[in-house]
Amino acid sequence: MAQLLEQFINGLVLGGIYALIAVGYTMVYGIIQLINFAHGEIFMFGAYLALMLITVFNIPFWIAVPTSMLLCAMLGMLIDLVAYRPLRDAPRLSALITAIGISLVLQNLARMIWSARPQQFPTETLPAFFVSEVNMQTGEVLNAIPLPGGGILPYRDVCILVLAVVLMIALNRLIHLTKIGKAMRACAQNRVASNLMGIKTNQVIAITFAIGSALGAVAGIMVGLSENITPTMGYYKGVAAFAAAVLGGIGNITGAMLGGIIIGLAEVLGAGYISGGYRLAIAYIIMIAVIVIRPSGLLGKSTATRA
Amino acid sequence: MKDKLTPKNIIFGLLICFLPLLMFGIDDIVAFLSQSGIYLGWPGGEYMLRIIVRACVYMMLAVGLNIVCGFTGALDLGYVCFYLIGGYTAGILMARLGVSYWVALPLAVLHGTVWGLLRGAPTLRLTGDYFAIVTFGFAELFFRIIRNEQWLVGAPNGQLRGIPSPTLFGITFNQNWHNYYHILILLTLVVFITYRLQHSRVGRAWVAIREDEQAAESMGINVSRYKSLAFAVSAAIGGLSGAFIAQFQVNISAPFFEFWESILILCMVVLGGMGSIRGAIIGAAILGSLGEILRPGLIIPYQFGNPRYLIFGIILILLMRFRPDGVSLKKT
């Protein structure tokens, strides 16, 4: 029971991270109907850039996080400008193949710049309360909430979860209350018509890429806090997050949040109780089942068989 | 664009048949030069022959993928799973159960075909991106099964060792030039079948489906049937390539069939021009050998890591931007 509780909380934390990445996929898909394969790579770049800012330039953690977000937002806009914008009116498969190409380039670029060696944020550079440990002799718990049954809930995980929820609510408000959010919704409904209404669609798409990428960068740093940073992490986590976006109904932001939590829970609980080797396979199975049985996802509106 | 059997192509084909002789010649020249104190840094004929055999396998895979991607116009991101299925079917049958290669080969093809149909059935109605994602998920699932199910393969991480070479009339086909003619025969067979299919009612139906599925359906083409046929033929070719590579490589392991391998094959098809057999072969010849040349240590120093996929990615982006119909076809 104690294990279940701990696994459940781990699942929620992972789910929050997935939701942040999935939002990036779903926002871009909602507007330009493109599976932005490179989004996972931007997420990975977010983690590496933060790591580099901290270790190479000795920038404190709290400044490195927004800087990395900003850099990733610029990277996302750059990718849109260089690779996707010229193909706006090309067949959709061309854009998808380009996205795969970008993903390949970024992943291997990261391998060349930062090497394939798994890296971690050095503990001394992190804020003190992120480093939680249990004193074996006294049983004293440092920087963590003790759970009934002997488990602990590190403050770090609480922070990740709270930050994920705050960012989600902020995004939701941005989409529904601001002018740019309104423009985004208009573009998602009909790009040509919104262009005719005087909305600068290219600008709106660029901003969409920027927001998605910035959220992806935060997620990357969150993953880097508890796991290793590797050049392939964007690919693995990216696909699981994409599965979350599909599950929630691609193009639907609330759906992406819900899908992220479900995929995160399924992955952690599945790895704990079924088999660790099939950790990611669970996300894939959910994704295939959703696409085959209900392509519109949990919250998406039904649009026949069109993908 | 349709492929034609011209005299030029036939002469080219005959030249290919004598390639191993050239390679042996190179070996002799290199040996002679190094005896005289001149070292060219040439990798040697046997090594080059192995590269060529591997490039031929890629050609076969590219031709197979081209059936789904080029002819019916559905983006398959998980073609490598049939390669994997063929490889492990043949490998397990031969290395663990002692089945002869000549029995294992058709079984591997059959197994691939079955999975092609099984994967195809639920995805018939899907178009574009969703089809691509499902194929991708399928390939990843197979990859994980091979990596995790030790009882199946007998070792962790899908390591299968000591796959025996095929024997016929007491001759063991384990030399590189054996493998060269072996793959050449298989490749010719595959290209011939694909070529005949392309120029038949079936091929025209596939292209009609690619251009407009609804219009094709309303003209009386049974879309599900022809799509299933395309998936089956394509998967069969994947299985065949896998069975060959299993005995050629002797040892196979899971990383050999990773997702990026699918992308590499897709890259070959795109480079040559989707929907053309000749394009697929040219693309595979270029990227198959380029991949070997760009291996770290040969031209590129080790400290730069492995930039192969970086270059493949750049090729994909540039092609889609400037030549979406591939390099071998006229710009439309």
Image (spheres, grey):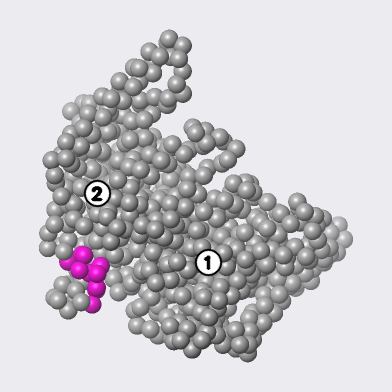
Q: Quadrant of the C terminus of chain A?
A: bottom left
Residue sitting at x 71%, y 75% = A163
Question: Which stretch appears magenta?
Answer: B205-214
Residues packed near mark 2 inside 10 Å, few (<14), some (14 to 19) or many (20 plus): many
Viewer-proximal residue among A121 and B62: B62
Residue beneath disc 2: B278
Q: Is residue B109 at least partly visible in the picture?
A: no
> Which label was assigned to residue A81?
1
- Which element is circle 1 on? helix
In the image, residue B207 lies in the stretch drawn in magenta: yes
Query: Magenta stretch containing residue A189, yes or no?
Result: no
Question: Which of pointers 2 and 1 indicates the residue nearer the eye?
Answer: 1
Circle 1: residue type? Leu
Foreground of the two, B221 or A211: A211
Q: Are marks 2 and 1 on the same chain?
A: no
User: In x, y percent, where is residue B124?
Assistant: 28, 71
| Viewer-nearest residue: B77 or A160 | B77
Would you say B38 lies left or right of B125 here? right
Quarter of the picture containing the N terminus of chain A is bottom right
Q: Main SS type for the magenta part?
A: helix
User: Would you identify the image quadrant in which residue A147 lies?
Assistant: bottom right
Instruction: Give me the residue at 16% from left, 72% from top.
Output: B221
Assign a secondary structure to mark 2.
helix
Residue type, label 2: Arg
> Residue B157: where, in percent of width, then height?
48, 47
Q: Which chain contains the residue that carries disc 2?
A: B
The residues tagged by marks 2 and 1 sit, at their Cα atoms, a distance apart of: 34 Å
- Above/below status of B203 relative to B152: below
